[in-house]
Image (cartoon, coloured by chain):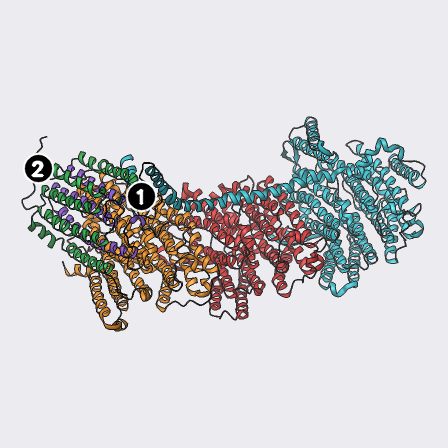
Amino acid sequence: MIQLAWLIPVIPLAAFAAIIFLGPKLKGNAAYVAIAAIVSSFLVSAGIGCDWFFVHHAQTAANFYADWIPTGTSVLRVGFGVDSLTIMMLFVVTIVSMMVQIFSIGYMHGDPRYPRFFAYLSLFTAAMLSLVIANTILLMYISWELVGLTSYLLIGFWFEKPEAMRAAKKAFLVTRVGDIGFFLGLLLLYLNTGTVELAGIFKQAELLKVPQVHIPALGIVASIILGIMAYGFAGAVMKGAKRLPGAIFAGLVIFGAAFILIPHGAVQMSLAAVASLLLFWGAVGKSAQFPLHVWLPDAMQGPTPVSALIHAATMVAAGVYLVARMYPIFSVDMTALNVVAVVGAFTAVFAATMGIVMNDIKQVLAYSTISQLGYMMMGLGVGGYTAGLFHLMTHAYFKANLFLGSGSVIHGTGTQDMRQMGGLRKKMPYTFWTFVIATAALAGLPGFAGFFSKDEILLAAYHWHGGKMVFYAGVIGAFLTAFYMTRLLAMTFFGEAKDKEIHAHESSKVMVIPLMVLATLSVLAGYIGLPGHSIFAHYISFGAGEHEISWTVMAMGSGAALFGIGLASLIWIWPVLRFAPLKPAFGWVQTLLANKYYMDDIYDIVIIRPLMVSTKAMFAFDRWVIDYVIVNGTGWITLQLSTLWAIFDRYVVDGIVNLVGELAKRGGYALRYIQTGIVQQYALILVVCVVLIGWYFVLLR
Amino acid sequence: MSITGYQIAFIIVAAMTVGSAVMVVILPNILRSALFLAFTFLGVAGLYVLANAELLAAMQVLIYVGAITVLIMFALVLTQQLMGAKIKQSSRGWLLAAPAAALMFAFLVKGFIQPFNKAASGAVASGPAPADAGTLVSIARMLLQPYVLPFELASLILLAALVGAIVIAKEDKE
Amino acid sequence: MNSWILTLITFIPLLGAAILIFIPKERTLVIKWTAVIISLIPLALSIWLWMHYNPNGVQFPKGAQFLVDIPWVNQLGVHYTLGVDGVSVPMVFLTTLLVTLSLIYSLFIETRPKEYFSLFLLLETGLLGTFIALDFFLFYVFWELTLVPMYFLIGIWGGPRREYASIKFFLYTLVGSVAMLLAILAMYFNTQPHSFSMLAMADAGMDIRLGASAPLVFAALFLGFAVKVPLWPFHTWLPDAHVEAPTAGSVILAGIMLKMGTYGFLRVLLPILPQTSRHFWVPIAVLALISIIYGALVAMAQKDLKKLIAYSSVSHMGYVILGIAAAVGVSHAVTIDDRAMALNGAMLQMFNHGIITGALFLLVGVIYERAHTRDLDSFGGLGVRIPVFAGLFSLACFGSLGLPGLSGFWGELFVLRGVFAVNILLTALAGIGMVVTAAYLLWTIQRVLMGSLNPKYAKMPDANAREIVALAPLMAIMVVFGFWPKPIVDILNTASVAIARIFG
Amino acid sequence: MPPVTWYLYVSAALFALGLFGIMTRRNAIAMLMSIELMLNAANINLVAFSGYLRGHTLVGQIFALFVIAIAAAESAVGLAIIINVYRTVKHIDADDINLMKW
Amino acid sequence: MTKFEFICVAPMIMLAALGILVLLIGTITDRFPKGRLNHWFPPEYFSATMIVPVLTMQGALFWAILHHGAEEIFCLNGAANPLITVDLFSIAMGFIAVAGTFVVMLMSWEYFGDHNTKNRGEYFALLFFATAAILFVTASTDLIMIYLAMEFLSISSYVLASYWKNDAKSSEAGLKYLIFGATSSAIMLYGMSMLYGLTNSTNLGTIASALSRGEVMSLPGALTAVIMVLVGLGFKIALVPFHLWAPDVYEGAPTPITAWLSVASKAAGLAVITRFLLVAIPMSSGVDWYTVVLILAGVSMTLGNLAAIPQKNIKRMLAYSSIAQVGYMLIGLLAAAATISPNSPDSAVKMGYMAVSNQNIGTSNYGLAGLMIYAASYLVMNLGVFAVVIGIEKRTGSSDIESFAGMVKRAPFFAWSLVLFMLSLAGIPPTAGFIGKLYVFAGAIQSARTDLLVLAIIAIANSVISIYYYFNVVRVVFMKDAETKAPLRPSVSLTVVVSLMLIFTFGIFVAAGPLINLVRAAIL
């Protein structure tokens, strides 16, 4: 059965092809083709899962290869492999995809490009599944890019909307910036191990340990980057005439400070660390980690099921999956993992803060996703391999649930702005309750799936060798998560409807049933990872295994969550506390958050504008310098020389003659001025030339 | 170095020749310069005589002075214009032409005559010329033996020139 | 068949052009279809060639397959030598395919069709001959033979500035090729016995024989090829020529004629002057890198769709040269496999750029015929109105930006893989080029297909059958080779290894 | 016989004068006359060398003889052409014979 | 004069005889009432037909000498002091000239149909005489003969150039040609007299031995003399700065005569300049004419090409083009000189015979072969262009480039032929011009002299420039619209000429072997 795993991505791919070519004929039936395909994939996955666990006893990973491309004297192979991680991902992807596609029948009903939507979803699913079963890093990269493509297509699905198409482009480009890292990492591994097969690479992982890479001036580069970022930040914040000098000043100050503070010494890194960091850069792009997180909130312009599937549950988790998949390389030395942990922790808190002030329901969820992905990264980074992946799985279910729930809300109210919502608790009961369950899971209330996974991450962070910073970040993140989710719930479902124009209604069954399935999973999925008796950890683990249960950690985590819920409830559900008094002192915080820390503006100032200017400058250079001056200039000179010959006749010879004529005139010999084409002058030139040639060659040499 | 009679004669003839030539090129009246051309030719014939080339001198007088000058006179009369002294015969280009010609002369002197003068060589005749050097017989012998081909060719050239001159000069009646 | 096949492929189009001369010019339909049908013959033959070509057979510096070697001008040592190896077989196929598709696309031409189609077939002979000839004299003849038909194609059927563009194209490329002529002669005199045979030259140890003049000879050849590629800063003929050329002309220009330059690198510079090539690999790589980034940035600034694609060609051909430079690069631990991969990448990029840019130019032609403008700002929202076109256009753009799963990816992958082995910095900078490429192509898609529809184009018809027939094979190749490039890489690989072995 | 260089100086002078005439004369016939001067200059050279050089082969004299013949032919044709020009443009002022230039 | 020697000059004699004959025919037919005889027995048919035997005779002579053994020297006035030397080189160059004359006669047939019904006998007679003169020029190995033959050629040419008597331009061309030519030849004569004075000989071979043995009165003087001789020779081939006559004369002369001047007359000039420089002035003598010619060649091709660009009249443009082409051809001469001389202190070319059994000048001398091949290909391509020009000029009445607009629609065959000829002139394959250029460049590279390489590079830059104006004509023909679309039907004779030239332009490329064989035999 396992050898049939290639069918899993191929079936949706076939569905994609079928819908694309037969789309106009299929019309509404396209959805059923797509769903049939994903159900088949799910069934095959299930079969393979059984095979893996019960026949193979989840022992050695099964790998299958085929020759793909000859490369010189060697051959590049392509293949697929199955292990527990794969199985887990297969289930996550197929289930969520299935639910989302069913949900979409209702959500996308009546869209003019209805078949196309399902085609793209199928293509996405195919690509995502092939990413999961790939056992060569090259195939992973290809699938990785293809999911990026489908993400682009789906974000820009309503491409008539300018924001949608801009968001799509942004998503593709920003992730591609990350992909370059993946690509370079791939090349580095390929070059140094001579293979792209994961098994082969891992086998040689130890060889990569030797510190070979000598990176000079990393500190200086970092200082420069910081300086530029500060310049951009100041440029974004400041207004008026002081803007440019202020920005330059800020940039210089920060650069100077960083230059002084950051040690400049050359950095020695092992190849594995470099490769891991490059791969992680790819993951940062895909999983929307700081600083490449900017595309994900914008990506909410896509249809909501897309957000649920791609930008919450699966594709964005691919970065985490990549880190997990390449864990043997990452763990060769700790440098890369430390970076992963810090970046993850920072992102977890950083994104969560922005979630607090957003008013768009999907935006909040988007920042929540970024934050949770940060969690997962953090988990992986601090050595919690199992924890990170466990959170990936649970998060997939409850975040998909949340997005679909918000989709249901949007479908019901026709708006995404939470300030126009309120009181939906009564009007949309199923949506409300499933939403509450998922929120609880996300907030990490004990008993819900999120609790178990988050707890494991915090536990791993607690035991991290690098200190407790990451752990506290995790706790703060937990608090913030609970806080903004409660705010979201409150604004959306509690209170009274704020906009009387909106007549909300509960969604149809095709939309509600997936919500219920996912809500169930949001509760149950946690129980395969009970602390101490984790089935999940039994199958999916790396290295040393789990830490002892720590009640402190559990208490702190849960406490933070409960505190967050409580605080938020006191503000929005039972408005006891008020923000207004804080405004004068902390208004800038809100401005800062509402502007997303000015990250978009910084990129605009630092990257996009210089780029556009440079393209124009280059083009001008091309037109005016290379083409006009050099090429046409040569031509021009040639032409000029040719006329010069005429001019030589006309002005030099003639000019001398004219000059003579002028002299002659002044001398009283009034004669005509111009004469040429005249044989005497020919004779004159002839004689002069002969004398010149003769004089030079005979007398001077 | 004493000056011989030959040399005195040479100087006189040469002065006449060059002087007439100067007149040829600068005289505004073209008929007069044609006359001076005849004098130049005569002077050249004199030089030939001084160089023991009597036959050539005779030819020079016959052909140049006799034929060519007359031909030129005829042509001048036929074209009958620009003969009056009032019309400037020279183009004002002489301001350039004079230095150019002077430079040419200087070049010939420095590039040919002076090196030639300095380089004594075995090619120079050692004794006096043979008695029959410039006579009709010796030249005729050469013309009809080794140089018969150029001789014939010259006749062909004259024929071609004749035909060409007639074709070009005659007036076609349309 | 084996000894005739190459001659047939090369000269059947010429014969076709001769046939067209005898068809009265009023019978335009007969002329057009005759041309298309004749062009199918070399296409079929080139497929036959591909099938019967032995990927593991003898490769260029050692020999060639389907070799024909007939003395031609004995007195000069000129032979009629034709032969193919892994470098040329895909190029031959590409040429025949693109010419056929261009002719199909051009069926609508109404001005002076007889001359148009005759010239096109003549052009095909020149192109094919360039890729097949193994005698330098013959090679040069074919090389120059391509100029004149293209001059006329641009000059007669081109855009508003066609006369300027055509003569610029002609002069510019001529500068390179006449320089090449001197170099050819220098190599000729250094082959014993004097011979124009490329095989003999490759065998002659030309670097050593030329001695101090080797760099000069190299520079002359390099100029000839670099202008054709075109490598920065010899590229400025290209935007003008591409923009002014008729659609099919642009397809051939970008799809095939640019490859003549890189083919020259692979066929001439590397095997015949290996040491000198190695000596100059850094400047070449730097020029290639500049081409990549510069071409991409300038493309981004364009408002004319065709010009944008023209500049993108500069950028993409830069990868080819980068791969070639990497293949000869000097670094401590470069293996034959590394070099071979770089060469594979370069050749794949040649082939794929031909396919993809050919398709893009055809698509530009499609839209230009309908809108009569190529101004990017005037489009928008066409994705709604003409979905088939939109799909094809997007596919081609994604192919062009090197999306994995489409054939364009492989070239870039292997080129960068090869470069990586030599120099990491070059690779990283080329990576920047990839991002910029993605940026301008996505922006193009956005400006053409997305957003709100310009009411002017509310009734624009979608791609018709003729256009789809011309485009479909290219799209199919793009996708098939995107997932399964083995058929073509099998052919390229042995050739690459053969060249790579020269460099050890 | 006077020294050969004397002849050479005379001939060089005649030659330069001939050139001067060609460069300055406007009348085409006068230009032909100047050409005759140059031919005579060459002839002086030839004759002088003929007597001066070893062997006294008379080749120079023969050469000069041919030159005289050629000069006659040339002036005949030249005058014919000038007369023809005169017929078409009614003058033979070389300064004004410039239909074709540049 | 032995019989065999007589056979060697037979072509010249035959041409002269034909000239006299056609003169008589013309006179008779002109006198005959109402031109009836003119209709039945026109001089042009006679001439064009009768020049074919001369060509055949040249060919036979070539064959005979080739098979008689290259050691035989066929000279008049004895091998020691030859006036003319009929060797394979002279026959080959003469053949080119006679073939050119043949084609020009075919063109004249058409051209003179209307312009000048009278005096056709004299026209063809002069053409015959001039061609005979060319044969003498190519074979002359004595300064006297060179001077006589050159003057013969010039005098005939002056008349021919002004043959269109009633046309002001033609008359003017004749006058300018005459004055400039006479001046140049006078300078040349003066140079010859100096050379005679320096070496005590007028024979090229003897001059060479005198120069190499140091029996010269002064070496600087020799260079002065050579430079002055070069004026006359350079005048004939229109080498800058002795080219000033060419544009005016080319523009004004009757077009067939322009064609003839650019091809046949130029071939003669090339032959004599080659022979004079290679045979009489060996480079080993220390007379450095090489650098002079090198610079003049470079200047010639550059200025010729540059000046051609702004031209509006195609004949004038072709004049500048021919000035430039001479520069290319001289590369061959220079390469030959560079290859022969250094290793042959004793005159490499004995007794005026163009080549010796010296290894240096054997089959591998690309320079000299290049010169001849270039001359041959220049013959066909340039005559092809002129045939097209005549065809169009005849119908439109103008030789301005503008009047060629849209010719592709009015005369497609001529238009496409023109493209090929232009390509050939620019040296782009597949044409004869390419072979010529290849050979000439090969010579330059073979010599391995830096200065020649530089010259070759200049030549290459120039051939790119030349495309600009050659294809300017093509542009006008193909891309401009004509005022009328009426087909322009050229006469049969012109079409035959164009076709012939087309076949040769292609043929010399495709079957270059035989031509190369002949040329090599000629210089072996």
Quarter of the figure with residue A699: top left
**Residue A265 in the image: x percent, y percent?**
65, 28
- Chain shaded red: C
Q: Is residue C122 something that shows in the picture? A: yes
Q: Chain of mark 2?
A: B
- Chain shaded orange: E
Say if C5 sits above or below A156 in the image: below
The residue carrying pointer 1 sits among few (fewer than 14), some (14 to 19) or many (20 or more) residues within 10 Å by Cα, namely some
Residue in front for this viewpoint, E430 or B5: B5
* Colour of chain B in the rendered structure image: green
Residue in front for this viewpoint, A394 or A411: A411
Report how far apart the C-alphas of labels 2 and 1 lie in the structure: 40 Å
Amino acid type shown at disc 2: Tyr
- Chain shaded purple: D
Task: Find disc 2 in the rendering and name its residue.
Answer: B6
Task: Find disc 1 in the rendering and name its residue.
Answer: A685
Q: Residue at x 79, y 51 (%)?
A: A309
Q: Which mark is residue E279?
A: none
